Image (cartoon, rainbow, N blue to C red):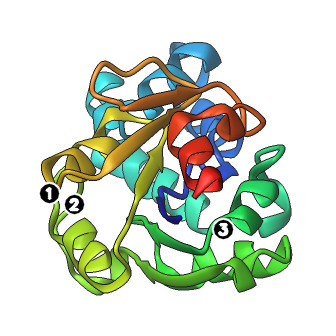
């Protein structure tokens, strides 16, 4: 099974670090739970929702660029799924060096055959060009993401999708943690072959 992964909020629990940064910049005007909820829609959505000024956005982005790999953690059980897959690839808007630094810090880089990052010039999700590139090259069986935005491109290409920690009406499958992954029909069917 070849799996396409979203990075932030799917492989790595980056939301606590991003929430801390936005809370620090926005001050008491924004509640942490609300910040995280809006970030889970998308970063641009959160900026609009909180009416972030250009100066605040520059500060937030600068602080996000300074997040240490030690400040983010892989989700529990994700390494077991990575090891199960025949190939893993990543599609993220994060810059390549930041992704590589985090993967190396957590000793996960060897699980990935390829990645498309924000440095590669593809249109932002939900545009499907980056997914099409990875699918044509690696024959993706399943795309995993924590937001509808991560699943729409795969749906457009006819790739099965799995929503992580979120109900999503367009997802083929939904899981609340990575132990649930091994109960998915697509996984059981593949193991039976």
Where residue 61 appears, as percent x and y from the top left, is 47, 58
Which residue is outermost to the front?
193
Which residue is rendered at x = 66% and y = 68% of the image?
66
Left or right of 52? Residue 186 is: right
Which residue is rendered at x = 60% and y = 58% of the image?
63
Q: Quadrant of residue 87?
A: bottom right
The residue identified by callout 3 is: 66
Quick one: label 3, few (<14), some, or many (20+) residues within 10 Å? few
For mark 2, give the secondary structure.
loop
Q: Are marks 2 and 3 in contact (CB under 8 Å)?
A: no
Where residue 135 appears, as percent x and y from the top left, is 29, 73
Front position among marks 1 and 2:
1
The residue identified by callout 1 is: 127
The residue identified by callout 2 is: 124
Front position among marks 2 and 3:
2
**Disc 1 to disc 3, how far (Cα)?**
28 Å
């Amino acid at each position: 099974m070849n799996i396409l992964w979203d990075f932030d909020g799917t492989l790595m629990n980056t939301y606590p670090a991003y929430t801390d940064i936005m809370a620090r910049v926005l001050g008491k005007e924004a509640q942490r739970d609300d910040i995280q909820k809006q970030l889970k829609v998308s970063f641009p959505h959160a900026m609009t929702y909180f009416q972030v000024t250009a100066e605040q956005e520059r500060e937030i982005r600068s602080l996000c660029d300074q997040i240490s790999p030690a400040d983010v953690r892989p989700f529990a059980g994700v390494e077991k799924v990575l090891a199960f897959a025949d190939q893993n690839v990543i599609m993220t808007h994060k810059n390549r060096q930041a992704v590589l630094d985090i993967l190396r810090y957590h000793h996960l880089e060897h699980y990935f055959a390829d990645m498309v990052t924000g440095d590669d010039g593809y249109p932002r999700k939900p545009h499907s060009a980056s997914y099409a590139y990875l699918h044509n090259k690696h024959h993706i069986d399943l795309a995993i993401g924590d937001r509808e935005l991560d699943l729409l491109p795969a749906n457009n290409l006819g790739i099965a999708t799995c929503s992580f920690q979120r109900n999503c009406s367009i997802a083929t499958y939904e899981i609340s943690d990575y132990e649930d992954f091994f109960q998915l029909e697509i996984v059981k069917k593949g193991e039976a072959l």
